[in-house]
Amino acid sequence: MGFIYLPSQERQIKPSDKYGRYNCGAVATAVAIDRATLGGVMVNGQDVRKATNEPIPDPGSPGLNMAQLCNAAKKFHIDLTEVRGGTFVTLLTRLAEGRGVVLAGAGAALGPNTCQPGFVGGHALMVNNLSTDETKVVVYNPLCPTRRYLAVDTVRKYAEAFGAQHGGLNWAYTRITPNVTKLS
């Protein structure tokens, strides 16, 4: 019996990253790269940010968009497929297929799961997998110290709140990764 690979958690805010406060997408993409390669390619948010066409955040729009994140992943030989619009059900289908998802959303919709009280802006998470009963997902939030299991409905609200403000859902998915055999 195998299990779904759980990548390492990376924190977005750290003293060594002067742009960390803007790197949620870069950090979520770094975790997705780890997942897509089962730990074979290890990069961090700073590496992903440097691989974009915006290595220094634009003061008017300091975050990275999904197209920038997908293009950065290609520089590490990883294909992320961007999805604009569509339904949350399609996202859940990709998770059920064994893919990871980098998901843009509205931080306020996460409530206490933002891990940064008062945070209400746009944000990015890496969603690793869907529970077998399809009620929870494993989420890597760059603002949190560890991965978390969140209700599917919470993540849906997070994605749809962003989509309502930005013309639809925005996310990218990894390749299907095989389950990892547990060593005895």
Image (cartoon, rainbow, N blue to C red):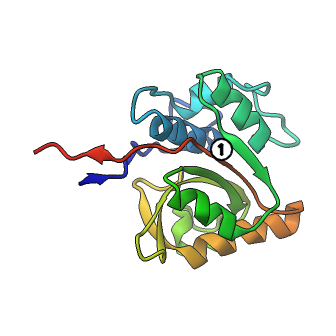
Determine which quarter of the picture holds residue 25.
top right
Answer above or below: position of 160 versus 175: below
The 10 Å Cα crowd at callout 1, few under 14, some 14 to 19, many 20 or more, is: many
Q: Residue at x 46, y 26 (%)?
A: 41
In the image, what residue occupies the spot 69% across and 68% down?
88
* Any part of residue 14 in sight: no
Q: Is residue 154 above or below residue 171?
A: below
Q: Identify which residue, 165 or 39, lies in the foreground.
A: 39
Q: Residue at x 51, y 31 (%)?
A: 44
Write the residue at 65% across / 72% down.
Answer: 156
Q: From the top left corner, tell me how far across and down residue 139 is, in percent.
A: 49, 59
Q: Quadrant of the C terminus?
A: top left
Looking at numbered disc 1 in the image, what kind of residue is underneath it?
Gly
Q: Is residue 27 above or below residue 131?
A: above
Label 1's element? helix
**Coordinates of residue 1 in the picture (x, y in percent):** 23, 54
Q: Nearer the viewer, residue 77 or 163?
A: 77
Q: Which residue is mark 1?
A: 25
